[in-house]
Image: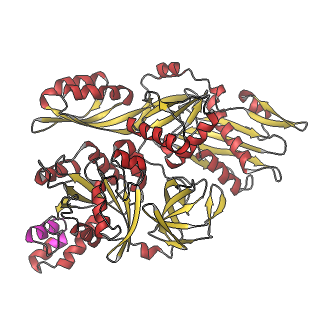
Amino acid sequence: MKKTIGILAHVDAGKTTFSEQTLYYARAIRSVGRVDHQDAFLDAHPIERQRGITIFSGLACFEMGDDTWYWLDTPGHVDFSTEMERAVSVMDYAILVISCAEGVQSHTETVWQLLGSYGVPVFVFLNKIDREGADPERVMGQIRNRLSADVVDLRSWQDGGAMDEELQEAVAAMDENLLDRLFSDGFDEAVWTDALKRLIRERKCFPVMAGAALEGRGMEGCPKLISRLSETDYQEKTSDDFVARVYQVRHDGAGMRLCFMKVLSGSVRVKDELPVCGEMQKINELRIYHGEKFRPVDRAVAGDIVAMPGMEGLRPGDWIGREGRESFRTDPMMEAELIYDQKQVPAFRMMQALRYLEDEEPSLAVSEREGRISVHVMGKIQLEIWKQLILERFGYEVSFGSCRVLYKETLAEPTYGVGHYEPLRHYAEAHLRLLPGKRGSGVTFQSKVHVDDLTLNWQRLIRTHVLERVHKGVLTGAPLTDVVVELAAGRAHLKHTEGGDFRQAVYRAIRNGLMYGKSMLLEPICGFVLRAPADSYGAIAGALSRMKADVEPPEYEQDSVILRGEAAYSLFSPWQEEFLRQTHGRGSLRLWMSRYDRCHNEAEVIEAAGYNPLADDTPDSVFCAKGAGFTVPWDEVRNYAHLPVNVW
């Protein structure tokens, strides 16, 4: 049985040590590495070993009994949450490691929420039971109060032997049929095990185990029990149509682009062709990775995770064998400007380097405006890593300016754009209606054009060009979101139209429509949960009121107060340091991206941006007359269009 098992944790909970022990007991590695010794198997990158943290999700493949495990080790630091989420998107089961000394921490709750949003079943491992101050019972209480009450304690069972009466009753209490059977026919371990397996898979219960990974305590029985209590149905799907999901892009030491995908159904072979960005690309090689090493395979089937060299155009979130790209839930709320010596490194060279990195980390969303380059960012630690990577890979010394809030733009009402691209021996025309979409929907596409008017292959290509990039708004140049792009009309030439022609027409049509339309600015709204000493409630409530936060009624737990709510990130973010001062370091704060909503100080932000939409992506079009192309300004394009302009 093939299983993708992921391991997650708050930073420093012992996740990498747990991975090392699991790989060792599975005989997938010969010796146990350590973070402080800089020899952990899956933290192979020099920066990871130098800093002692996981930055890139690592992959190992090994046998666990009769199962094949694909083991995904993920970053624990909040700044690398986007990397973690991409790994979560292909997990069958997850192991959440919690330190018995620190307990459930702020990022632990964030990880738990993310696993729930993807419907991933979770095993919990209480680590560091040997540490001074470790209190497993206290942590069990935190799990029940802050994560889920549906936990079942397997500590008495994880090292083998039979279920004791307490565990039998705990499992039976979660299933009415088992409860009836317990009082009628009595206990049957096989029946109880099957029921527990089903409850775990359906996320109706979350088993808890414990140990000390650094010492190896609890580590031999834990993976075996996880294998026994987990199951997948990939074997039944090998004869179905081929469907896979891309979750990661990397470059190997030679610069080869590697596209990692999880096969969800069917199978694929070397030399097969896959549809990528409107064209077929041949698979020249399939690799199964184990750390930095790999072995080539001729065929991948449902349940496998494989890497394909090349495959330009595929990005994390892309489906193969199914339409569309699935967006990820973890979004940066800040951006920072890149600072570098443009005399030493031309701007186009720096952009090439950043696009290379953006291929691996799409959330970077590199943009250039009036000669200034900006990237999206999760936090300051991430910027330090990018600084090191740019120097290591390209030899460019860079720094970053201060982080600023990342705004987005959308439409307040429908608009219509025309894009025409017709230099000599090229031709494409696209008419797009741009409609306000649901908040949080991103940019979506639909077509109202009949295939008799524009063939399906051109319509699919237009869709690809609509969705392949982040389009800029016209108020501040911020990313465009929550817009439905509707193909209203389109035309191609039998001889002169190439794929790139429609790319130009689509980009210009979107920009053209935005110039005509009424846009509005959106700002990030962050969700928060904070814990603080009860005697600091007054000062905290006053601060939240001044920033117009939407706060739920307070909850009290012993001598602490818990507050949950939402606030504009631009107002809340600067207050985080003040919160730590007000609570004298005894408070904890969990912050996450909740949604985007109308900017509370829109006019002020737009004025400060000083953005000129005509100096950026062009809304103009190119037409042809007397054997030469000429540019038509955006507000005259409709008069030159070859197709009728039906605004509504």
- Percent x, y of residue 387: 47, 38
Q: Which residues are magenta?
A: 164-178
Left or right, 455 with reference to 530: right
Left or right, 261 with reference to 579: right
168 in the magenta segment:
yes
The residue positioned 76% from the left and 50% from the top of the image is: 498
The residue positioned 76% from the left and 40% from the top of the image is: 421
- Percent x, y of residue 407: 47, 31
477 in the magenta segment:
no
Q: Quadrant of the C terminus?
A: top right
Q: Nearer the viewer, residue 390 or 605?
A: 390
Q: Quadrant of the N terminus?
A: bottom left
- Percent x, y of residue 108: 27, 47
- Percent x, y of residue 379: 39, 36
Magenta segment's dominant SS is: helix
Q: Quadrant of residue 3?
A: bottom left
Q: Would you place residue 273 above or below residue 356 in this image?
A: below
Q: Would you place residue 514 above or below residue 254 in this image?
A: above
Whether residue 247 appears in this view of the structure is: yes
Q: Nearer the viewer, residue 410 or 435?
A: 410
The residue positioned 14% from the left and 71% from the top of the image is: 179
Q: Quadrant of residue 334?
A: top left
Color theme of the render? secondary structure
Q: Would you place residue 555 above or below residue 1 in this image?
A: above
